[in-house]
Image (spheres, coloured by chain):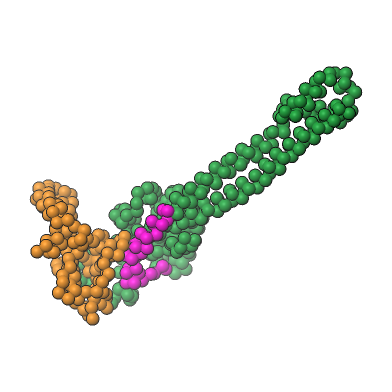
Amino acid sequence: MSLRRAGLALLRQQGAPLVESLSATTQQAQGAVREAVEGCSRGVSTLAVKQRMKSVGNIQKITKAMKMVAASKMRSATAATENSRGIVQPFLRMLGDMPDTQGAKAVFVPVTSDKGLCGGINSTVCKYTRATVKAVRDGAAAADSGEAAPEMMLVVMGEKGRAQLQRDMRDNIYGTVADTNKVKITFPEASAIAEELLKTEYDTARILYNRFVSAINQKPTIATVLSPDALERAAAEGGAMDSYELEGPDRPEMLMDLAEFQLAATLYNSMMENNCSEQSSRMSAMENSTKNAGEMLGKLTLTYNRTRQASITTELIEIISGATALAG
Amino acid sequence: MTLQVCIMPPDRIFWNDQADEIILPTNTGQMGVLTNHAPLITALDIGVTLIRSNSNWNPVALMGGFALVKQNQVTILVNEAESAQTIGVDEAEIAFQEAKTKLEQSQGEKQRVEATFVFKRARARYQVVKQLGV
């Protein structure tokens, strides 16, 4: 800076007559220096890069923090999720899994998250929901050509699913359940949601969620729960249920209770699994984000340094050439 | 030959152990299950189940659910389960008396149903501690 000021002062000292006798190079140099002083144009390119670096650095810090938060949440959710599987296994063992059951009314429950920045799990669930609805519709059309098409209803869990599905399936959406993760997911909460689901009087309920396989693997899964009537029908056709004696006088009522309990247990398990999947997916998405931000920051730093060095070199050249021209 | 008893509330595995006999509080009364029982599904009311190992009886309070018996494997799925270790004696007794008076004083269908529910839970917990104490 001081070199430039000295050079400029020297130029001013010489006065106007000397300016006319200067060679073209020095005239150029004089003009450039004046321009630099007036417009500070050489500093602008480094300023832009510096601002960009600052914002990318902030993004990197934020995504790193989000990753750590998601990792800790996932750790605590994993144990609870594994425990919640215990209550679903006996039902699967006893009643079996009949995903291709037909009925007059089919309810689909896609389980998604409320918050974003969690990778692709919500899109996956929505994609599977659309495919399953289509498959059930086609399957019903193929099976009974005489009966009317089954009524398809969607009960979406989570804001993200609602936003994605209401674009093309708005008519089918019966309702949305949001903010389930604000407090800890508990079985009474799942029971309350199951209660609402039962009011739709479905024949088959298909819950679509992401099963938590490991921290880097989340599998989209469909859990099928039958209504008491459908269960009775399936049991009558022979199956694991037949081998059991049913204690108590009220067999239909007990079957109804059993089906309700199965729905609540399956819903609870799917909510827990999806929550765990959400945290692990967010963790890996934020990890990628942090890594990308770091790379971008590296590239920007190189650009910044290059720009800075180039501007210094240019200034020096101008001053030196100006001074040399004056001297000789 | 012993029974493998597994008590599971939704959020964890509460009990997974061998037993000789188990008495279940079903909707229609107490029911005993020994080894080689026929396959069975039954609904459970809110009450106390007694699990016997040799000659030790262990009481566990169950808050309603189902019991599945098959091939000497007893699977109990309940909303909630509590054993004597987690129930305080005095607290259970006080809760029981309170619930009893509330039930006697309740008026109207809704109040009575709710009071019955609370009473059954308090009674189950009280019975668990009383059994162990006596």
Question: Chain A appears in which tint?
Answer: green
Q: Chief secondary structure of the magenta span?
A: helix
Task: State the residue at coordinates (48%, 54%).
Answer: A283
Q: Is residue A150 visible?
A: no
- Asked if residue A52 lies left or right of residue B55, the reply is right
Give the residues in magenta: A72-100
Q: Nearer the viewer, residue A157 or A1?
A: A1
Total number of numbered labels?
Answer: 0
In the rendering, at what x and y percent does residue A134 appear?
Answer: 48, 61
Task: State the residue at coordinates (19%, 70%).
Answer: B51
User: Is the N terminus of chain A in the top left, top right, bottom left or bottom right quadrant?
Assistant: top right
Task: State the residue at coordinates (18%, 49%).
Answer: B110
- Asked if residue A8 lies left or right of residue A289, the reply is right
Q: Nearer the viewer, residue A316 or B17?
A: A316
In the rendering, at what x and y percent does residue B47 appear?
Answer: 17, 62
Question: Chain B appears in which tint?
Answer: orange
Confirm whether the magenta stretch covers residue A145: no
- Asked if residue B22 lies left or right of residue A88, the reply is left
Confirm whether the magenta stretch covers residue A75: yes
Task: State the residue at coordinates (32%, 65%).
Answer: A87
